[in-house]
């Protein structure tokens, strides 16, 4: 393992979530790679979404909670530039071996990645209040 991979694994920390012998390879990747990265990058995702709403959704702060949740979901699912920026924040913390696994099944893993991120931001919607 090269120095970069070793450093990334140290920074990310331990696997999050339950896995067992019956876990699929995608589920293992999710719990061993995606969840720790999402946790590590959480503050960056929040800052990125705040920037997004200040640039493109200035009326976000006047919306109901339900509408705010829908905006979070739509921003990540439908705004390809924003989605790709978020993906880059995650993929940039893959090791070389993890990236090799990712490219074999990127479609399924992208879906998991974005769903986890949507749920993470929705669960913190109270942080997206005007100060």
Image (cartoon, rainbow, N blue to C red):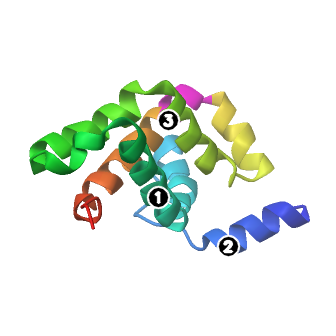
Q: CA distance from mark 1 to mark 3?
A: 13 Å
Dividing the picture into quadrants, the one containing residue 59 is: top left
Q: Which sits earlier in the primary sequence, circle 1 or circle 3?
A: 1
Q: Are marks 3 and 2 in contact (CB under 8 Å)?
A: no
Q: Secondary structure at mark 3?
A: helix
Identify the residue at horizontal 80%, vertical 61% (top origin): 5
Q: Which mark is on residue 82?
A: 3
Identify the residue at horizontal 72%, vertical 42% (top origin): 99
Q: Is residue 116 left or right of residue 2?
A: left
x and y percentages locating residue 121 in the rendered image = 33, 54
x and y percentages locating residue 116 in the rendered image = 38, 48
Q: Which mark is on residue 47?
A: 1
State the residue in front, 102 or 124: 124
In the rendered view, tell whether residue 96 sits above or below residue 8.
Answer: above
Q: Secondary structure at mark 1?
A: helix
Give neighbour class at mark 1: few <14, some 14-19, many 20+ (Cα, 10 Å).
Answer: few
Q: Secondary structure at mark 2?
A: helix
State the residue in front, 24 or 92: 92
In the rendered view, tell whether residue 122 sits above or below residue 127.
Answer: above
- Is residue 20 visible in the rendered structure shown here? no
Magenta span:
105-110
Which one is in front in this view, the residue at disc 2 or the one at disc 1? 1
State the residue in front, 39 or 128: 128
On the image, numbered disc 2 is attached to which residue? 11
| The C terminus: image quadrant | bottom left
Q: CA distance from mark 3 to mark 2?
A: 25 Å
Q: Are marks 1 and 3 in contact (CB under 8 Å)?
A: no
In the rendered view, tell whether residue 52 sits above or below residue 12.
Answer: above
Q: Is residue 104 magenta?
A: no
């Amino acid at each position: 393992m090269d120095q970069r991979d070793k450093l990334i694994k140290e920074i990310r920390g331990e696997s999050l979530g339950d896995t067992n012998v019956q876990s699929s390879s995608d589920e293992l990747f999710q719990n061993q790679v995606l969840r720790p990265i999402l946790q590590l990058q959480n503050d960056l995702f929040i800052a990125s979404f705040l920037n997004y709403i200040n640039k493109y959704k200035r009326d976000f702060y006047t919306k109901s909670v339900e509408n705010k949740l829908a905006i979070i979901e739509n921003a990540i699912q439908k705004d390809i530039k924003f989605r790709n920026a978020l993906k880059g924040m995650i993929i940039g913390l893959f090791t070389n071996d993890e990236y090799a696994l990712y490219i074999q099944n990127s479609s399924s893993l992208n879906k998991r990645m974005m769903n986890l991120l949507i749920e993470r931001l929705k669960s913190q919607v109270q942080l997206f209040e005007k100060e």
